[in-house]
Amino acid sequence: MNFDSLPLHPLLSQATALCGYTSMTEVQSKVIPTAMQGLDVMACAETGTGKTAAFSLPFLHRLLQEDKPKGRLRVLVLTPTRELAIQVGESINKYSQLTTLKSVAVYGGANINPQRKALAQGVDILVATPGRLFDLIGQHGLDLSLVDHLVIDEADRMLDLGFVKDIERVKTLVAKQHSTQLFSATFSHGIKVLATKMLNNPEWINVTQSSTASLIKQEVYTLDKRRKAELLAELIGRNNWQQVLVFVSSKESAESLHKELKLDGINNAVFHGDKTQGARNRALEQFKSGELRVMVATDVAARGLDIEALPLVINLELPLDAEDYVHRVGRTGRAGLAGHAISFVGLNDEKMLLEIEVLIGQTLPRQVIPGYEIGAPLPERYRKLDVETTTKPKGHQRRKSSSGRSNQANSYDSRRANKSRKV
């Protein structure tokens, strides 16, 4: 189904053409006609399938068609993270570029005053994270009573972050007569419960088995967990990889890997929750432009980041929750392009790998890189470090390897036991 077959407002049809959109993705072809009628929608679709256009074009069309004053807040899009809020806001601006509709994205980690002033000048569409939304409501009297189009994006992530009460509260603050679209990448019990509370006789749309998944080559490399960083650096050099997004499970692991790769001469940056928004934005732009070969990220980056034609995602450490695997690998293979996802798996990772395979409904192919077999004799520097570990007294300063690097063994098991740790 093509975009030009939709009965969209002419200005939106022209904008989609300017964006280079021709054929609709599966989620777009199923959601847009339904949402254009003002019906509630519960849509389950993988990342990278064009969900933003699926929920944005219908409410933009309805705003343009309705004979109501412009510049009044009519649409609210809730997102779990600031990165996703920024991305969604940019997409809405592209789709509405030929219209007089105004939108603004508000999120934490940025000065609230420019966001407040933008709202005071009059907007039609607000994209917001829950925390900043309620800052504006509580401190600056933001009024949602005219909002009659409500979108909850990445609802499963909202549940993970504990935003259920906030979502339910928003429902009580918007206009009584409103439509709601709820989007999620996974279809858990919690999502079904939330949808039942939030939606009125909705259309249930499930396209999780879309063609996107088949475009991502997913595989597992098995090895000793102590040699993951070593193998990563070797593969980057051997294959001349130029753009690799590497996921780890904690900010401590991210910083450690950043130093390891830097010592190997690989230009990289870290992306995690302790970094300021400015630092995250700089790292992302440098990575997109090719200035950085590697971006090391925690799961704060698994959702919301749209990196055009990203060729490769590597899970140096498996996620703490199986569902986060879907979002990690969803950074590649987007918009109909092919992608590649590799997971480094040690013996202590097998339980989580099984959970992931059950979730995605497939067994991932394993392979072993020669020289990195589990049980193979370790290189000399690792054997020396093992000896030092048993002979150094407690409190001794951190050991150095023969290359001058700190030996910091992975503590994946302990991190999995502490799922509340911030990323």
Image: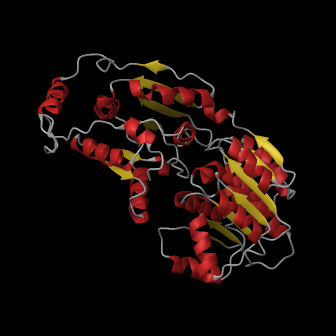
Where does the image place residue 291, in percent across and percent down from the top left?
A: 35, 51
Where does the image place residue 84, in percent across and percent down from the top left?
A: 57, 57
Rendering quarter of residue 144: bottom right
Q: If the image is split into quadrants, where does the N terminus sit?
A: top right
Q: Is residue 73 above or below residue 408?
A: below
Nearer to us in this view, 260 or 30: 260
Determine the residue located farthest toward the front in the rendered image. Answer: 394
Q: Is residue 185 left or right of residue 393?
A: right
Residue in view at x 53 percent, y 61 percent:
82
Residue in view at x 60 percent, y 27 percent:
358
Residue in view at x 73 percent, y 68 percent:
75
Rendering quarter of residue 322: top right
Q: Is residue 22 visible?
A: no
Colour scheme in use: secondary structure
Q: Is residue 23 left or right of residue 238?
A: right
Where does the image place residue 2, in percent across and percent down from the top left?
A: 77, 45
Nearer to us in this view, 291 or 31: 31
Q: Is residue 98 above or below residue 35?
A: below
Number of residue marks: 0
Nearer to us in this view, 136 or 99: 136
Q: Is residue 332 visible?
A: yes
Residue in view at x 75 percent, y 65 percent:
171
Q: Is residue 16 left or right of residue 402?
A: right
Where does the image place residue 353, in percent across and percent down from the top left?
A: 50, 28
Rendering quarter of residue 130: bottom right
